[in-house]
Amino acid sequence: MGGVKKPHRYKAGTVALREIRRYQKSTELLIAKLPFSRLVREVCMNVAPASSEVSRWQSQAIQALQEAAEAFLVHLFEDSNLCAIHAKRVTIMQKDIQLARRIRGAWGGLG
């Protein structure tokens, strides 16, 4: 019975580790620009709904916000990963993120 060759499959986790290494090496932004821009504008409208003027944003301002947001999230996930490892787990859970935020304090350890 023969000539059908099974497709090659990597061990579980190999592709995930390769993907992690690829993203750790990269410096480009990973959140899509347009949805992030829409989110920023939506939050701005919710924070200051009384002003009748439409707020305008420079593209560099939104880019700076996105860089800061992604840096914040990366550091939060690094700290959450340490919390999970301390609990002898490899999977980050919500309680790890909550603990990392609580340990960091009000400003998230960035000030």
Image (spheres, rainbow, N blue to C red):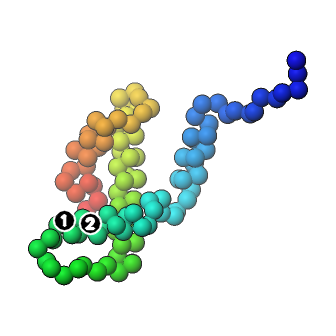
Q: Is residue 42 visible?
A: yes
Q: Determine whether the residue tagged by mark 1 lies in a helix, strand or loop.
A: helix
Residue 77: percent from the left, percent from the top? 38, 46
- Judge left or right: residue 91 versus residue 15: left
20, above or below 69, in the image = above
Residue 8: percent from the left, percent from the top? 74, 33
Query: Crowding at label 2, few (<14), some or many (≥20) Cα neighbours within 10 Å?
Result: few
Question: Where does the C terminus fall, quadrant-wise?
Answer: bottom left
Tag 1 near tag 2, CB within 8 Å = yes
37, above or below 17, in the image = below
| Picture mark count | 2
Residue displayed at 88% across by 21% down:
2
Residue displayed at 26% across by 40% down:
99
Q: Which residue is mark 1?
A: 46
- Judge left or right: residue 7 versus residue 23: right
39, above or below 13, in the image = below
Residue 81: percent from the left, percent from the top? 40, 40
Q: Determine whether the residue tagged by mark 2 lies in a helix, strand or loop.
A: helix
**Quadrant in which residue 13 is drawn:** top right
Q: Nearer the viewer, residue 72 or 47?
A: 47
Residue 26: percent from the left, percent from the top? 55, 59
Which amino acid type corresponds to the residue marked 1 in the rendered image? Asn
Residue displayed at 40% across by 53% down:
74
**Quadrant in which residue 9 is drawn:** top right
Q: Which residue is mark 2?
A: 42
CA–CA distance between discs 1 and 2?
Answer: 6 Å
**Quadrant in which residue 102 is drawn:** top left
| Outermost residue, left side | 50
Q: Is residue 68 visible?
A: no
Residue displayed at 84% across by 27% down:
4
Which amino acid type corresponds to the residue marked 2 in the rendered image? Glu
